[in-house]
Amino acid sequence: MAARNCHLVIFARRPQLGVGKRRLAADVGDVEAVRFARHALDRLTRTLGHDPRWRLWLAVAPDRPLDWVRTGTALPQGPGDLGERLTRVIRSLPPGPVVILGSDTPTVTRADVGAAFRALGLHRAVFGPATDGGYWLIGLRRGPGERLPFEGVRWSTANALSDTLANLKGATVTLLREQEDVDDGPALKRYRARS
């Protein structure tokens, strides 16, 4: 697959006080939550941003301004739940396979993303399962008019991955390694202990 046809999208909220990481902020305070959000996004864009195997996009919220994005091409997420925002962003991209990850798993490597794109050569979808029952990565091999698997997913619950997989019943799917999203204080402590 040519790099111009492979799309890596990082979903991120602008790292500023009061925007995003609310569960983490409840445990560690707003300043520490913003510090982690900046660190995680910086680490991901430095690690993944200049790889010739894919084109990097940042799907950001709030939708404006976009001028703070320094690496990759900025896209607004738009309104709605996560499924609606994922659908909107995926449909706005040029043709080719897409891999999406959140900015709250800074441990993602180039090898993880490369494995996801390779898996899409054989499977319709690939997931990076998260320890909380969700997923840190989803990859889709897209076709024209193909239905996306986000309808009825119970986001931010232990059912997010199983709901999405149920929507892909009959399709070939593979899983990558399990990782932990940093969504709360205990997860941040574990991340720092590993780093």
Image: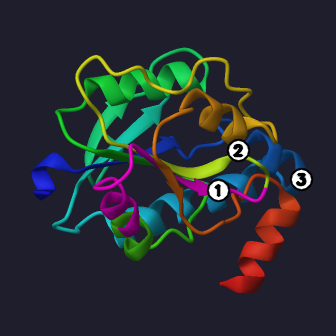
Read off the magenta span. 115-131
Q: Are marks 3 and 2 in contact (CB under 8 Å)?
A: no
Three-letter residue code for mark 2: Lys
Relative to 135, does residue 108 appear above or below in the rendering? below
Nearest-to-viewer mark from 1 and 3: 1
Q: Residue at x 22, y 58 (%)?
A: 54
Q: Does the image show residue 21?
A: yes
Q: Residues within 10 Å of mark 2 (few under 14, many from 20)?
A: many
**Residue carrying label 2:** 21
Q: Residue at x 20, y 41 (%)?
A: 96
Relative to 105, does residue 171 appear above or below in the rendering? above
**Residue carrying label 1:** 129
Nearest-to-viewer mark from 2 and 1: 1
Q: Left of 31 or right of it: where is 42?
A: left
Upstream in sequence: badge 2 or badge 1: 2
Task: State the image coordinates of residue 174 (x, y, percent, origin top left).
Answer: 51, 56
In the picture, the quarter occupied by the C terminus is: bottom right
Separation of residues labelled 2 and 1 (CA atoms): 20 Å
Q: Nearer the viewer, residue 85 or 169?
A: 169
Q: Residue at x 24, y 31 (%)?
A: 93
Q: Does the image show residue 66?
A: no
Relative to 134, does residue 189 appear above or below in the rendering? below
Separation of residues labelled 3 and 2 (CA atoms): 10 Å
Three-letter residue code for mark 3: Asp
Upstream in sequence: badge 1 or badge 3: 3
Task: State the image coordinates of residue 69 (x, y, percent, origin top left).
Answer: 33, 46
**Residue carrying label 3:** 27
Three-letter residue code for mark 1: Pro
